Image (cartoon, rainbow, N blue to C red):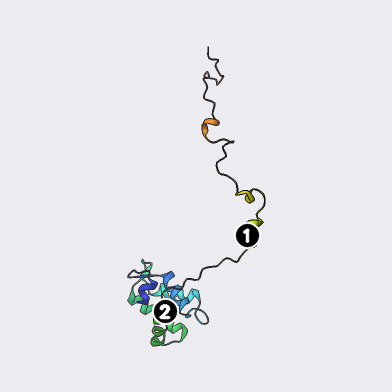
Amino acid sequence: RVFTLYAGGQGSMDGAGFAKLMRDTSLQGGRLTGSEVDLAFAKVKTVSERRISYMQFLEALGVVGTKTGMHMEALVARVERAQAGPQLHGTVAESNRFHDDKSLYTGVHANGGPSTVDSDKVASLSQHLDRSPADTRGVKTVAS
C-alpha cells in the first residue's frame, strides 16, 4: 500500500517517489544522504528504465539497510508507518501590511489599479494604421 501511494498510484515508482519516501520516514539524514538514496535506487533499477517495480523496491530497501545498519524487518516496519502517503509541506506566506491592507495602497493602486483597456488610448490597430489611398511610393493621393 505504501509503495502504491509513493508511486503515484502506478505499478512502479520513480526516483523522486523513492527519495520522498526515504525523507518522510526519516531514513534519509544522519547516516544516509540524498546521494546515497539516489545511488541505492540506481543500483536496483533496470538500466534503460526510470522506474522500479515492487520487487526492486524491496531490494532497494535492502541496500538502504546495509547503508544504515538496520535490519530489513525494522526498515519495513518504518516504511509501513507511512500509511498516510507523501507528506506535503508547502510554504505559507507571512502577512504583509502593505499588501494585505488595501487602505494603505498608494498611487494608481489606491484607485483600483491600472486598466488594461484605456478607451482614450489606442484600442485597436485601426487607430494605428492609415489606410487612406496612396501611390506606390507611399505618397497620399488626393481624392478628386
Please state if 123 lies on the left or on the right of 50 as rendered.
Answer: right
Question: Of discs 1 and 2, which sits in the foreground?
Answer: 1
Residue at x 41%, y 76% (from the top left corner) = 84
Q: Which residue is the site of mark 1?
A: 101
Amino acid type, mark 1: Asp
Q: Earlier in the sequence, mark 1 or mark 2?
A: 2
Instruction: Tell me the distance, in whole angstroms, between the alpha carbons under discs 1 and 2.
Output: 41 Å
Q: Residue furthest top?
A: 144
Picture coordinates of residue 112, whole percent (x, y): 60, 49
- Asked whether 81 or 45 is in front, the reply is 81
Q: Residues at badges 1 and 2 in contact (C-beta under 8 Å)?
A: no
Amino acid type, mark 2: Ala
Residue at x 42%, y 71% (from the top left corner) = 17
Quadrant of residue 139 in the image? top right
At label 1, counting other C-alpha atoms closer than 10 Å, the crowd grade (few under 14, some 14-19, many 20 or more) is: few
Picture coordinates of residue 142, whole percent (x, y): 55, 15
Give the label on residue 82, or none.
2
Please state if 106 lies on the left or on the right of 3 as rendered.
Answer: right
- Asked whether 96 or 112 is in front, the reply is 112
- Asked whether 13 or 107 is in front, the reply is 107
